């Protein structure tokens, strides 16, 4: 950035996702000169509204506002006139591999109570355990029948692994759900998060298709090295995903504070993937938001969302999380769709039509995400997120992004809030905003 005849602070923001664009918008509005550097050829990061089907926008990353009351993303969605369609577990149905109804909701409640009891039991332990170890050690788990155990496992998968994106053998039993939820509905945003990102990025200098590979302190600020050259600024906000920070693909010329590096090492990047299937007609229960599948392969295509209410189109989305998502991600498009259709045919019969189109996410293979979102692995806690957020190198190097959010990690609003806080700290002369 050229500073001649301009005394405004210069800031480079790395990453044009929700945190990056939230930071850039606040910095620009606060009088800073901002440039955003983004590796991909598009903005949005893990909020990616696909326009592959010109008549139907589809979110391949985030699609819900988790807790609409007091949520800053709700405010943006309302300003832009987007539609929010609430979903509820009260409107859910579960089928087994023969298409029979499964009395899932009641047993899922029992399963969650069992999980809480198992966690309480290890509260005073010297060491954390994985959720799996804590649950399997409990007398209640050992006492349940094999058939109920399959249902309890489905509940742990759909209600915990899908939400936190980590396998229960890796999730911290003490801390996996640490955070503070906003009250209100869980609501799908139509036509997707895309308009929010475009709104935040309006008028900002965004350099697309420019992967960053190095960050160094310079005489008066920082120097950023990308595949295209170097950039100078007074300070930098790093909103790169935890997966990218963990991979070591970004070279920090001076080491980070030890507690920050420890946080990067301890927190983990989980996986959640979508298979979006578009049909000519809906053949699933149209009044249900959620459809769970108790299939022959544990946790494969366990969770489905009916997108008919949100889009008015016969659209259904199959999810896989954690270990199962890793397995399915190795399949190509044709085999992924075929595998998803096997689950749907088991639930709804062999006469259901083939989809007229499908779109599939593979967030682990994505070099600019390397996973879906962060989770508390055994050995990590909310303290690590606090350590990751904030600044290094005497206030020249700031971190933001979902993984740095102590209270709202793994969410769109958490990312936005950390981006805005980092911007406020820079505008405040490097001090944390009050
Ligand atoms: C499948 C899925 C479903 C989800 N569902 C929800 C949901 O319903 N609700 C919700 O609240 N949250 C959800 N999330 C989580 C949410 O999407 C993220 O928490 C949030 O979008 C993260 O924003 P961010 O700005 O921190 O990171 P990102 O959006 O990942 O932004 C970081 C940016 O950095 C860029 N980048 C990476 N490497 C480089 C590099 N070397 N140089 C330059 N740029 C680089 C990336 O391309 C990206 O644009 C979901 C995520 C996934 C994957």
Image (cartoon, rainbow, N blue to C red):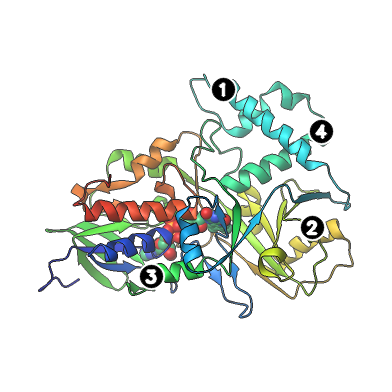
The numbered mark, 4 or 1, whose residue comes first in the sequence reads 1
When the figure is inspected, residue 377 is found, relative to residue 205, above or below; the finding is: above
In the image, what residue occupies the spot 45% across and 55% down?
Answer: 72
Q: Nearer the viewer, residue 386 or 267?
A: 386
Task: Give left or right: position of 343 versus 227.
Answer: right
Spatial separation of the CA atoms under disc 3 and disc 2 = 40 Å
Task: Give left or right: position of 152 versus 102.
Answer: left
Label 2 secondary element: helix
In which quadrant is the C terminus drawn?
top left
Task: Give left or right: position of 352 versus 105.
Answer: right
* Residue wearing tag 1: 122
Label 3 secondary element: helix
Disc 1 crowd, CA 10 A, few/some/many (<14, 14-19, 20+): some
* Residue wearing tag 3: 201
> In the rendering, at what x and y percent does residue 193 appear?
52, 65
The residue sitting at the bottom extreme is 54
Res. 369 visible in picture: no
> In the rendering, at what x and y percent does residue 251 appear?
30, 56
Res. 117 visible in picture: yes
Spatial separation of the CA atoms under disc 3 and disc 4 = 52 Å
* Residue wearing tag 2: 343
Disc number at residue 146? 4
In which quadrant is the N terminus drawn?
bottom left
Kindly indicate the quadrant of the structure image that contains residue 5: bottom left
Which is in the foreground here, disc 3 or disc 1?
3
Which is in the foreground here, disc 4 or disc 1?
1
In the image, what residue occupies the spot 52% across and 69% down?
Answer: 81
Spatial separation of the CA atoms under disc 4 and disc 2 = 22 Å
């Amino acid at each position: 950035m050229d500073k001649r005849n301009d005394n405004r602070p210069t800031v480079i923001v790395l990453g044009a996702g929700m945190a990056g664009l939230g930071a850039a918008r606040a910095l620009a509005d606060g009088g800073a000169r901002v440039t955003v550097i983004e590796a991909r050829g598009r903005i949005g990061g893990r909020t990616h509204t696909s326009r592959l089907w010109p008549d139907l926008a589809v979110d391949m990353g985030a699609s819900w506002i988790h807790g609409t009351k007091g949520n800053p993303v709700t405010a943006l969605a309302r300003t832009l006139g987007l539609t929010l369609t609430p979903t509820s577990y009260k409107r859910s149905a579960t089928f087994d591999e023969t298409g029979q109804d499964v009395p899932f909701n009641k047993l899922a409640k029992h399963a969650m109570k069992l999980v809480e009891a198992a966690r309480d039991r290890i509260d005073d332990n010297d060491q954390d355990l994985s959720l799996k170890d804590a649950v399997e050690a409990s007398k209640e788990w050992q006492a349940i029948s094999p058939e109920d155990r399959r249902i309890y496992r489905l509940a742990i998968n759909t209600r915990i692994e899908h939400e936190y994106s980590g396998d229960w053998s890796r999730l911290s039993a003490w801390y996996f759900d640490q955070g503070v939820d906003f009250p209100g509905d869980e609501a799908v945003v139509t036509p997707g998060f895309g308009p929010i990102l475009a709104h935040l990025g309006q008028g900002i200098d965004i350099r697309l298709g420019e992967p960053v590979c190095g960050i160094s302190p310079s005489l008066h600020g920082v120097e950023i090295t990308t595949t295209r050259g170097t950039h100078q600024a007074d300070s930098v906000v790093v909103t790169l995903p935890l997966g990218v920070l963990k991979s070591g693909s970004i070279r920090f010329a001076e080491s980070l504070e030890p507690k920050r590096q420890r946080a990067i090492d301890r927190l983990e990047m989980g996986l959640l993937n979508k298979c979006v299937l578009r049909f000519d007609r809906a053949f699933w229960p149209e009044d249900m938001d959620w459809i769970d599948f108790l299939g022959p392969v544990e946790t494969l295509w366990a969770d489905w969302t009916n997108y008919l209410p949100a889009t008015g189109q016969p659209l259904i989305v199959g999810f896989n999380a954690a270990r199962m998502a890793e397995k399915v991600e190795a399949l190509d498009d044709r085999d992924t769709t075929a595998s998803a259709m096997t689950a749907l045919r088991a639930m709804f019969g062999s006469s259901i039509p083939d989809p007229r189109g499908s779109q599939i996410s593979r967030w682990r293979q994505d070099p600019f995400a390397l996973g879906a979102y962060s989770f508390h692995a055994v050995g990590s806690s909310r303290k690590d997120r606090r350590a990751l957020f904030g600044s290094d190198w005497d206030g020249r190097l700031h971190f933001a992004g979902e993984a740095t959010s102590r209270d709202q990690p793994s969410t769109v609003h958490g990312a936005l809030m950390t981006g805005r806080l980092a911007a406020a700290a820079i505008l405040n002369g490097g001090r944390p905003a009050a």
